[in-house]
Amino acid sequence: MKDKLAALARRHGTPLLIIDHDRIRRNYRTFTGCLPRVQAYYAVKANSNQGIIKTLFEQGASFDVASYNEFMQVYEYISHFEDKDKDFYIWDKIIFSNTIKDKETLSRIRRYKPLVTYDNEDEIRKIKDHCDTAGLVLRLKVPDIGSQVELSSKFGAEPGDATGLIEHAFDAGLTVEGLSFHVGSQCTNFDNYAVALEITSEVFHECRRRGRHLKIVDIGGGFPVPYDPQAPRFEKLAEVIDAECARLFPQDVDIIAEPGRFMVATAAVLVSEIVGRARRDGKMFYYINDGVYHTFSGVVYDHWIPNFQSDKDGPIEVCAVVGPTCDSFDKISLSEQLPGNLQIGDYLYTENIGAYSVVSSTRFNGFDGAKILHVNT
Ligand SMILES: Cc1ncc(COP(=O)(O)O)c(C=O)c1O
């Protein structure tokens, strides 16, 4: 495998991010196969590369978009549809999952009658004023204990406020279609999902008792990726979700999800190159041509712990792997088990780097960042 990656790196240069579209298709099929009742809206924010959107569009995926620009990236594939089909597609297969949207965005998407999430009163007013064609989904605050990335400190209505916020939206002349939550990204604690579904079902049934016929339950993202062999398996989580949804929600409820990381993390590998080396206080520092301001930005924003492999043999020692910029913060890892005798020009390989990586890469210090190579398109 490394031979093939090295050959590609020699041909295309480094740093090289290789995205395998067979793997994306496989991840999509695994998700929909294990959760047959759940409609999968790919969270474009995880990796908004146009080629990935195209592959998932062709698979029949739906999409979770955070902004007008992400919406337009999906719209590209439906712009030629007849108006009726376009309207249906947008209604059925796109959700604006960002609970806070600026007025300009709302005004621009008004004509598309979008499905949008919200979690507070000011947002209701804004939606009423600028996008009254929207269907609303109330996002609930749920536990995100142990998740790699927590979201509940910034998003979600307190469950106790939920029915009030739903009535408020109806009073404003809007329609609330359903409820959503997000248990935090890379959620390895399955209880978070069980508790979130329980909280959601209480609000859901209370609304139905009040005559508010909610139709959608959106279970968000968070589905874990096997970054390390100890990570709990998605298939086991799917059994929990499937059983709990059957127990808690009638069959006429549409269950949807917003998987991001799950679709793309395992579909990319990065080949970087050692461009410098120095022994500092006895530790070998490898300087590579990619770093935390570039493809390894997930180390900062996604709390991600990267992995490095070499194709060279040599006595293993604890090494540091650091980025190419002049900032001393640009240290990717201080504790990699690597041969201590790697040379300038040698490659390092990082697997499972498809999510929350290139999307948040900058051009800091003038470095372009990784080239992207699509394979098995
Ligand atoms: C609203 C929303 N939906 C979906 C996702 C995707 O989550 P994940 O990549 O954990 O599946 C995120 C990630 O931040 C999010 O904020």
Image: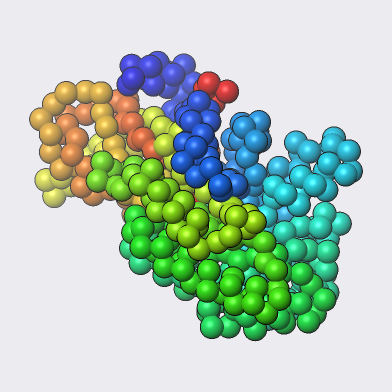
Quadrant including the C terminus: top right
In the figure, 130 relative to 220: above or below? below
Say left or right for 75 vs 219: right
**Colouring method of the image:** rainbow
Q: Residue at x 32, y 27 (%)?
A: 347
In the figure, 300 relative to 84: above or below? below
Q: Residue at x 41, y 63 (%)?
A: 194
Q: Count of labels shown?
A: 0
Say left or right for 65 vs 286: right
- Quick check: can you spot residue 355? no
In the figure, 310 relative to 86: above or below? above
Residue 262: where, in percent of width, then height? 46, 44
In the figure, 109 relative to 282: above or below? below
Residue 182: where, in percent of width, then height? 50, 62
Along the viewing direction, whichever of 311 and 50 lies nearer the viewer = 50
Q: Residue at x 41, y 32 (%)?
A: 269
Along the viewing direction, whichever of 64 and 7 lies nearer the viewer = 64
Residue 118: where, in percent of width, then height? 65, 70
Q: Residue at x 83, y 61 (%)?
A: 110
Quadrant including the N terminus: top left
The quadrant holding residue 106 is bottom right
The quadrant holding residue 114 is bottom right
Say left or right for 337 vs 307: left
Question: Which residue, as the protein is rendered here, is positioned at the far right?
Answer: 83
Residue 137: where, in percent of width, then height? 66, 66
- Quick check: can you spot residue 314? yes
